[in-house]
Image: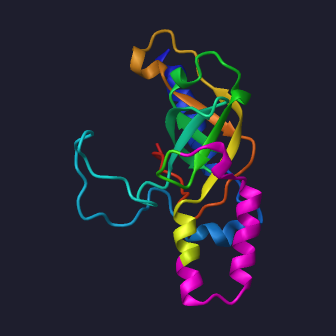
Amino acid sequence: MNSLFLIFVYAIALLYQSASLGGTEEKYLQYNCGQRPKVKEISARIINGTEALPNHWPWMVAIYNSNDNLVCGGSLINEEYVVTATHCFRNQDAHEFSVRLGTTLKTNVSQCDTPQDFNKREKTTRNAEISPKLDKEYNEDTETQVICVEVESVCAPIQDNCCLFMKDIAVVKLKTKVNYTDYIQPICLPKN
């Protein structure tokens, strides 16, 4: 069964490498996986640790259920896939979940934008002349920008002979691809 797990991880890596960028390749060239701003100090502690600032962990996502409860976290591996834990879904239908990206804050569904809403706003802002004051306000807005995407499917491999920890991995496919920003970027996967 260890070989099945390795095949699963290899398939995820291939998905990551082969994900097409469509016509937006130029836009994505500025975003490398696993890149984030330099942080002066990060505490190893969970309680009384270092607060996560906006865009310091741009691959982190929050997974919410249909009752708008935060159930798990995950990591964005490309514009349409997230890796997370299988136990987050507890045999529930994948369509009962959504993924929220672009913020370090716990949010509610009323704060959500779809990727399409965000793209429209970004194009409008880019095409307009922006005063320094408005530009600062736009950047502050973007820090709390929440992109919400419904889950299309969840894939969790069957691994009977693995330890408990190794059985708890899942790949989530998003219904809509997300665009990378300073606040939404993929984590790196090993090439081997």
The foreground one among 6 and 171 is 171
The foreground one among 163 and 152 is 152
The answer to whether 161 appears left or right of 157 in the picture is left
Q: Is residue 6 visible?
A: yes
Query: Horizontal and vertical percent for residue 83?
Result: 54, 37
The foreground one among 28 and 17 is 28
Which region shows up in magenta?
107-136
The answer to whether 70 appears left or right of 92 in the picture is left
Residue at x-position 74% and y-position 74%: 123
Residue at x-position 25% and y-position 65%: 40
Q: Is residue 104 above or below residue 161?
A: below
Dominant secondary structure, magenta: helix
The answer to whether 50 appears left or right of 96 in the picture is left
**152 in the magenta segment:** no
Query: Horizontal and vertical percent for residue 81?
Result: 63, 42
Residue at x-position 51% and y-position 24%: 5
Query: Horizontal and vertical percent for residue 173?
Result: 68, 37
Work out which residue is located at the far top of the displayed protein and give it.
Answer: 160
Q: Is residue 31 visible?
A: no
